[in-house]
Amino acid sequence: MSEKNKVPGVSTYNGPAGGWGALRAVAKAIRGQMAVGRDTSALLRVNQPTGFDCPGCAWPDPKSTSSFEFCENGAKAVSWEATSKRVRPEFFAANTVTSLWGLSDYALESLGRITHPMAYDATTDTYVAITWSEAMDRIGQALRALPDPRMAEFYTSGRASNEAAFLYQIFVREYGSSNFPDCSNMCHEATSVGLPQSIGVGKGTVLLEDFDHCDAVFCIGHNPGTNHPRMLATLREVSKRNVPIIAINPLPERGLERFTDPQVPIEMVANLATPIASTYYQIKSGGDLALLKGMMKWLFEEDRNAIDHGHAGVLDHDFIREHTTGIDALKADVESTTWDVIVAKTGLSREEIEAVAKTYSQAKRVIVCYGMGITQHAHGTENVQQIANLLLLRGNIGREGAGICPLRGHSNVQGNRTVGITEKPNDALILGIERAFGFTAPKEHGHDAVRAIQAIGEGHSKALISLGGNLAVAMSDPQATFAAMRTLDLAVHITTKLNRSQLIIGKQSIILPCLGRTELDIQAEGQQSITVEDSMSMVHASAGQLPPASEHLRSEPWIIAHIAKATLPATRVDWDALVANYDRIRDKIEIVYPDFFDYNQRIREPGGFRLYIAASERKWATADGKAHFLLARGVSEDPNLPSQHLTLTTVRSHDQYNTTIYSLNDRYRGVTGRRDIVFVNPDDLKANGLQHGDRIDVEVVGPNAVDHQGNTRSVRGFVAVSYPIAAGTVAIYFPEGNCLVGLDSFDPESGTPTYKSVPVSLQRSRAKAPAVDA
Ligand SMILES: Nc1nc2c(c(=O)[nH]1)N[C@H]1C(S)=C(S)[C@@H](COP(=O)(O)OP(=O)(O)OC[C@H]3O[C@@H](n4cnc5c(=O)[nH]c(N)nc54)[C@H](O)[C@@H]3O)O[C@H]1N2
Ligand SMILES: Nc1nc2c(c(=O)[nH]1)N[C@H]1C(S)=C(S)[C@@H](COP(=O)(O)OP(=O)(O)OC[C@H]3O[C@@H](n4cnc5c(=O)[nH]c(N)nc54)[C@H](O)[C@@H]3O)O[C@H]1N2
Ligand SMILES: [Mo]
């Protein structure tokens, strides 16, 4: 038996991404979840003009065809929601919350869709069915009883529609709070905060068509084969044109290496694969700031050399002069950053960095794509801004084939932000609400996700309403987060399935089951559709077709409207009229946000419409009307760290959607049936006296080593897997690794937890069995 096969469930995957494995997985997903009594043709109406938007990811759809039916992870997301399994009141009666707490999120969600509104009953330690009107009375009473509306937190997970998210923010602001923790605070907040300072808008500037015209694509810190699978079809086309695709990632992700498109019969039959990345740089986790500075350092040097020799420079001087400020300070900053530091932080050689900079400088039109590998760092916002700097240096923003392309997370997280899920209301929003509804929303800023948990922990906040998601499990530091949530007076979960957040019981805990994307939504004036915005600012309609999982389910807009009515007896909003016909909600959105002009008309056109992105036209919505080169000081996450440590990053497996675990497999990384794994470079194993397959403990080092109870942050008894990951970097799965990230460890500018760079040490385990379950 080879060394590699010594560990049960761990082997090497040699195939491409996609291919027959993906088609088999689509078939399995449908068979496993949807077979009994549900209509599998639902899948074929995903991302079609007359169907519903895929809840899987926020990658846009090509205008001509839908690749959805071949998207493995889209199929998993849809079938997981459209499952025929149910969690009924009888199940809750037979299982105490204490006993359910012993189950993993995987097991809990596998139970199926929740069918009734439920409230926790302390005498029996069970959830008990209640009527909708009783649920609303209790919530209204509890919210009205708070001495200050700022003592309630209103969480949003990015699957909610524009209509639901908009009603939610109107309700919360009329109630008197700006506390909007949301999943974006753990995700792309660095983009939302960082890019407006750079280019005047917190969104991407490219359209799908730009990929047909680019001369180079950079993929930094994202894993499209798993998290945005439909993007592989786009990258495949780019690769077929012989355009360089540069991958920058500590892990050798198969989707970035090669892909067999299930939609191309010849590739399937002949087992052919298209190579994706032309060059793959395995950077150390947390090394991106240094890499970007190194690339810019080379560009400045090269530019001066060229000009000294009478050639045109490599920078776009006309663009820089006309459109930007801050170039001199940027130049001084990168020139003062030494190659020694850059090489040490990235783990890449100077030659490699110069080569990647050269590729960048030789391409006329460049797109940079990025994901969580960039944002979830103490320097997340600065990382994003250095990407913008790199692009601005050669005028790569605001023209065909070029631009910045953040890969958003949840399918409508971008839309949620656009329609007002923000803890920092600006004047335009407050005036807009006044115009549309005639009340004045609070101006003061509220809480983001980390701050919300802190406020609950400190006893300042006593109520939490969650519009979807699994906040307790997604957040860093479960030790502190779970303890905080147990002190709540009121916890309300608007949800489709059971998860551990709902089992952390406060004085009152209420579960409100809602319709999913795939389901018919009938209101007083007939069938309704909702709208969503993808990663490229395209807004389009979505209408589910399946009969609801239970007759007791209500739509998210209905639920929010009824909470509002129960909480605000003197409300200025006609909630019933808005819910009767969602066109009226969209009319109100249009009043608050004039960019949505002719909203109802434009979403009725196939493909919907694009929201205006000024930077795409080289108009900079900043205070001085210019794009800004911005500085990041230094290249280190934390200069005070011990010099000898490994950097741990947390990643998603192929069979998971955030805290939703579909199975314990991670096909492209060769893992089957387990998640208690630490991926370690063979040299790092050796240096630590460890071997492939050893049970190890991972302990945090440095300022955040100890949790609030005085215990060393650690996972114990995990299996070390020898893996071709960048030396100096180790990886484990999210959420198993969340206990290693301190609640106070986040990017000060965006509040994003440092999920992608935790300083750790490894040693042979002192624990007998795995200490953390999946
Ligand atoms: N099937 C599926 N689809 C999803 C999701 C899902 O869980 N499952 N989640 C959705 C959501 S909410 C989001 S935000 C997106 C997430 O999509 P991604 O951003 O792709 O998510 P991650 O798995 O966190 O992967 C980040 C990648 O960054 C790399 N990386 C880690 N640290 C670093 C670093 O320091 N530098 C660099 N350059 N790279 C690094 C990792 O190796 C990994 O390949 O996907 C969305 N789509
Ligand atoms: N260590 C580590 N932690 C991370 C990350 C990481 O990379 N590493 N990533 C972070 C990121 S990018 C994100 S976005 C967050 C995710 O944080 P969340 O968005 O809070 O988490 P999810 O796991 O997506 O939420 C899943 C739950 O949503 C509910 N749900 C599903 N569909 C619907 C629906 O249609 N309506 C309603 N109302 N509810 C529904 C179900 O109850 C399901 O259990 O996690 C963050 N946490
Ligand atoms: Mo996300």
Image (tube, helix red, strand yellow):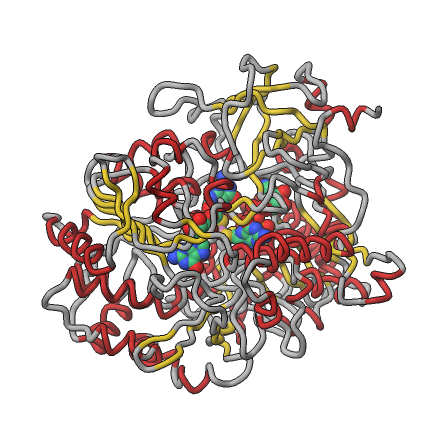
In the image, residue 215 above or below residue 380:
below
Q: Quadrant of residue 206?
A: bottom right
Residue at 56% x, 58% y is 36
Vertically, is 148 above or below 762? below
310 or 731, which lies in front? Answer: 731
Residue 406 visible to the viewer:
no
Work out whether 293 lies above or below 268. above
Residue 668 placement, left or right of 242:
left
The percent coordinates of residue 559 (x first, y second) are 29, 63
Q: Quadrant of the N terminus?
A: top right
Number of numbered labels in the structure image = 0
Horizontal placement of 498 versus 218: left or right? left
Instruction: Please name whichever residue, 661 or 60, is drawn nearer the observer in this view of the structure.
Output: 661
Residue 137 rendering spot, x and y as whole percentages: 16, 56
Q: Residue at x 72, y 25 (%)?
A: 7
Q: Is residue 240 above or below residue 730?
A: below
User: x%, y% of residue 557?
Assistant: 32, 67
In terms of depth relative to the viewer, which is nearer, 270 or 416?
A: 270
Q: Is residue 258 visible?
A: yes
In the image, 563: left or right of 246? left
Q: Residue 529 in the image: state x and y as whole percent.
A: 42, 76
Residue at horizontal 86%, vertical 66%? 266
Q: Residue at x 62, y 33 (%)?
A: 674
